Image (cartoon, rainbow, N blue to C red):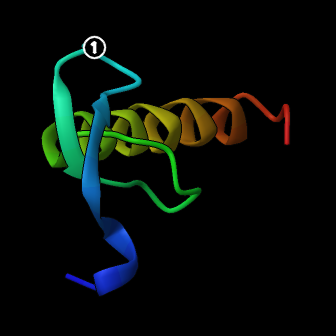
């Protein structure tokens, strides 16, 4: 994990509100499992849109 994904200051996770030192790729506080779940959902939505010819 890159050091850019860690902060000394714990802030509320953008998904669940519990404190985390981790940051997502945009620098927002997010637990790893929540950020990975959001990415998987985005990928599935993009694949579905592509399959329907929306992209």
Q: Quadrant of the N terminus?
A: bottom left
Q: Quadrant of residue 26?
A: bottom right
**Residue beneath the point at 27% across and 13% down:** 17
Q: Quadrant of residue 34?
A: top left
**Residue beneath the point at 55% across and 42% down:** 47
Packing grade of label 1 (10 A; few <14, some 14-19, many >=20) is few
Q: Nearer the viewer, residue 2 or 41?
A: 2
Residue farthest front in this picture: 9
User: What residue sits right under mark 1 in the picture?
Assistant: 17
> How many labels, in total?
1
Q: Nearer the viewer, residue 28 or 11?
A: 11
Residue farthest bottom in this picture: 2
Image: 48 above or below 23? above
Q: Quadrant of the C terminus?
A: top right
Callout 1: helix, strand or loop?
loop
Q: Quadrant of residue 39?
A: top left
Question: For this view, does 44 lie left or right of residue 21?
Answer: right
**Residue beneath the point at 29% across and 86% down:** 2
Percent across and percent down for residue 40 are: 34, 42
Question: For this view, does 36 lie left or right of residue 14?
Answer: left
Question: For this view, does 4 lie left or right of residue 18?
Answer: right
Question: For this view, does 39 lie left or right of residue 11?
Answer: right
Percent across and percent down for residue 21 are: 21, 51
Q: Nearer the viewer, residue 38 or 43?
A: 38
**Residue beneath the point at 70% across and 42% down:** 50
């Amino acid at each position: 994990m890159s050091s850019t994904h860690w902060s000394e200051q714990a802030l509320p996770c953008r998904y669940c509100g519990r404190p985390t030192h981790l940051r997502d790729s945009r620098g927002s506080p997010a637990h790893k499992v929540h950020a990975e779940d959001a990415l998987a959902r985005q990928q599935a939505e993009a694949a579905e849109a592509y399959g329907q010819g929306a992209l």
